[in-house]
Image: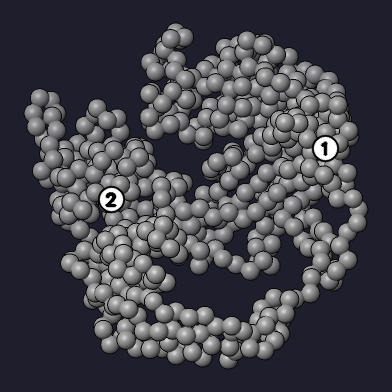
Amino acid sequence: FISDAKPPLRNGDFGTEGREIELITNFFPVEIKDLDVSQKIKDLSIDDSKVSKGKGGRGRRKGNHKKEIIPSGQNTEFVHYHVVIKECRKERSTKAEEFVDVDDQTKFPYGFSKRKRMEIFETMKKSIPAVFNKSALAYDSRNNAVGSPDNPALSNRDGTQWEVEVNGVNNRKKKYLVVLTPVNRHTLKEVMDELKGASTQPAELTLTATQMMDIMFRHNSSIKYLQYGRNLFFPTTGEFGRPTDTGEGMESVVGFFGSLRPAQWKNGSLLLNVDVAHAEFYKEQPIIDFIKENLHIRTGVPNDILKDTHRKKIEKELSGIKVRATHAQPRTYRVNKVLPKGADTLTFTKDGANITVQQYFLEEFDKKLRYPKLNCLHVGPLHKTVYLPMEVCRIAKGQRTKKTSELRMQNMIKATAVPPRERLRQTKEIVQKSNFSQDPYMNAIGFSISDVPLSVKGRVLPAPEVQMSEKVLVKTGKWDPRDQKVFKGGELKRWGVIIYATNFVTKQELINFIERLQKMGNDRNMSIYSPLEVLPMQGPVPKPDVDLTNLKAKYPDIQLIMVVIKRRKPCMERSNVLEISKYMF
């Protein structure tokens, strides 16, 4: 193992075959300016005259505080901090033991959202400007933060902690503890030397340093958009394109992938890689509308207990999803279960007596339910009896789906597949609307991102000759094999058919299809014999594992098994057939 191994570079002898063309990439050049960084950091400052003292801070100051003089240019330092966020589990408590790490899955079984982490981090910065206005401090919404330049107030190797208060449910204040511990640091000169291959530092520098700069780049996008993974960002306003309905209560949202990448372009540099991204989200809509779409109910609203199979399907989709209750002051809950009872029969204890959910809503909120027989939702803490009728719930905005069904995936591909020219237009539009060139965190370290994509030279090689019964001309990368016979035809002698769509395909239709298939093969110089067997479905339920195995055992040298299944509507036998065929042929 060679720790400083690097891939070999091209020696300068470029290709000569074919014709030269210009290729437009989805990479955008990053310029590094030699400027006074301190001037840029002033743009990030906030008036702290009305901000109270935070733990670990330096107290209240009136007016503008004095800015430090910061070194400029390539001596600028990047400092990597490890971030730990802890939540106070008891109100009005300041004891250290009452603060719990938000990464503790036993205390936070559903996890702790990146958006909430970012809100806490930004609240900390804004509430203590005397400390955090001295550097551009970016956060990856997990456990890493990057500051530039070095901030003396955060230099304690054992970590510096800051207490902040953030609005929680029903605008109740909640206390958090943010701990910042410096891990490592690099200068901009070290980064540029490594990109140019002139560094004396270890080879892993590039990975660490570019990741740090990538965090600086992603910070603003993480605040403006919904972030998924490290590099995927999606707006909730549709500013990059209108969402596309994919069916079953879901929609495809247009976002982007963005990441800084080291490159050997211009003897070592950075490029911003941007691409259009699509992801499926739950529609922001009433739960009842979601049920109608998901269960394909075309008319009316169900006002009865859902069938148990339907209830389990809806529960699988909604479990863990956030909904907003609309019957009183809007409040967000997380769904636990879809209960088997409706509001007219589901009871709980209030003031020592049993009361139905329907009666409670009438007495407490003067609300007469329109669909009292429809199943209720169990929401909020698992140990509490918080029951909500579906008609007072809306799916909260900005939630990705758990798993995309086959039908929805087909609809998504149809909507998102566009020609390269259109994809380039979308990518350039994303860069311009996101205003990367004016990003304050990138400008603070002297980086400027171009709005014009990088162009490189490429070559189009001569098209190969395609030999069928005669030579076929290839035009623009395509050839037309119609009315042509293959050069050497094959034979399909031993094959069989299994029919699982007996209610949709008649025997005569299948015979006609096989005859047309044989004729098409003969026209192309291929021999297709009649199938060995045509097996209808045995019993009420398809059993591809049994049927395929038996047919293969009966004819060990069988070349092909054609399985006829239902069209369009996703069905289990399709995935089962594909899985079994992996080890049969």
Assign the N terminus to one quadrant of the image.
top right
Of mark 2 and mark 1, the one earlier in the sequence is 1
Query: In the image as oriented, which residue stretches furthest toward the left?
Result: 353
Crowding at dot 1, Cα within 10 Å, few <14 / some 14-19 / many 20+, comes out as: many
x and y percentages locating residue 394 in the rendered image? 34, 48
For the point 20% across and 43% down, which residue is it? 339
For the point 17% across and 67% down, which residue is it? 539
Which residue is tagged 1? 195
For the point 13% across and 29% down, which residue is it? 349
Which residue is tagged 2? 314
Seen from the viewer's position, the closer of residues 460 and 362 is 460
- The image quadrant that residue 7 belongs to is top right
For the point 38% across and 15% down, which residue is it? 90
| Amino acid type assigned to the residue bearing label 1 in the image | Leu
Seen from the viewer's position, the closer of residues 126 and 453 is 453
Total marks shown come to 2
Q: Is residue 190 left or right of residue 527?
A: right
| Amino acid type assigned to the residue bearing label 2 in the image | Ile
Marks 2 & 1, CB-CB < 8 Å contact:
no
Q: Nearer the viewer, mark 2 or mark 1?
A: 1
x and y percentages locating residue 450 in the rendered image? 79, 50
Callout 2 secondary element = helix
Q: Is residue 95 above or below residue 423?
A: above
One can see residue 45 in this view: no
Crowding at dot 2, Cα within 10 Å, few <14 / some 14-19 / many 20+, comes out as: some
x and y percentages locating residue 331 in the rendered image? 35, 37
Q: Is residue 36 left or right of residue 376?
A: right
